[in-house]
Image (cartoon, helix red, strand yellow):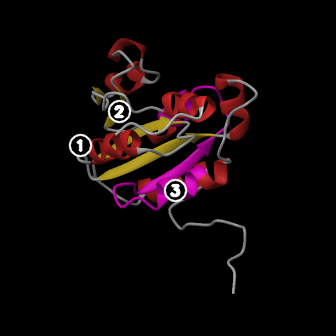
Amino acid sequence: MSAKNTLTHPNILAKEELLARLKDLGGKKIVFTNGCFDILHAGHADLLERAGSLGDVLVVGVNSDASVRRIKGPSRPLTPEAQRAYLLASLTCVDFVTLFGEDTPIELIRAVSPDVLVKGGDWPKDKIVGRDSVEAKGGQVVSLPLLEGISTTSLVERIIKNRTPPQ
């Protein structure tokens, strides 16, 4: 027996449903992060674990396929949005996943109004989209250091070069 080719997960929510669920949490510290998450790797898992530890609820905004193409180019994403969202929602440290179609998550961040906004250390704090909005309401903005040498770009480059994985 084979599974259907549609991936659903109870923690993947449309923006409106996400906002309703967050409103019902009353008083829990909400952490938000976002990204393309094109090829989920250890660097992503590490960042998400650490982000989740900064509050009670971790919300992950995921760029839609169209958004990724505009940002990364016509050859991306390598993994369709439904699969990227499913993988993220399956991680125990992630409470909710929602897709967004804009090039930046600014509108989603304003709507979620997180207590903590997190990005990876490749983003200087003053360049993190949504920083002004989060700090204006007394929230915290955090740029977490990344694991060295682990990135989707480096994985793609290694695949293209058909190199053996590092030992």
Of pointers 1 and 3, the one earlier in the residue sequence: 1
Residue 39 lies in the magenta stretch: no
**Residue for point 67% across, 37% down:** 77
Measured in 3D between alpha carbons, the distance from the residue under mark 3 to the one under mark 2, in whole angstroms, is 19 Å
- Whether the magenta-drawn stretch holds residue 108 is answered as yes
**Residue at the spot of label 3:** 87
Q: Which residue is mark 2?
A: 118
Instruction: Check if mark 1's residue and mark 2's residue have beta carbons within 8 Å.
Output: yes
Q: Quadrant of the C terminus?
A: top left
| Residue found at x 53% / y 31% | 158
Relative to 79, say whether 104 is above or below. Answer: above
Front: mark 1 or 3: 3
Going by the picture, which residue comes out furthest to the bottom? 1
Magenta stretch, residue numbers: 84-109
> Residue 11, position in %: x, y?
50, 62
Q: Are marks 1 and 3 in contact (CB under 8 Å)?
A: no
Q: Which residue is mark 1?
A: 54
**Tag in front: 3 or 2:** 3
Residue at the image position 44 percent from the left and 44 percent from the top: 41
Amino acid type shown at disc 1:
Leu
Of residue 47 and residue 96, the one placed in the foreground of this image is 47
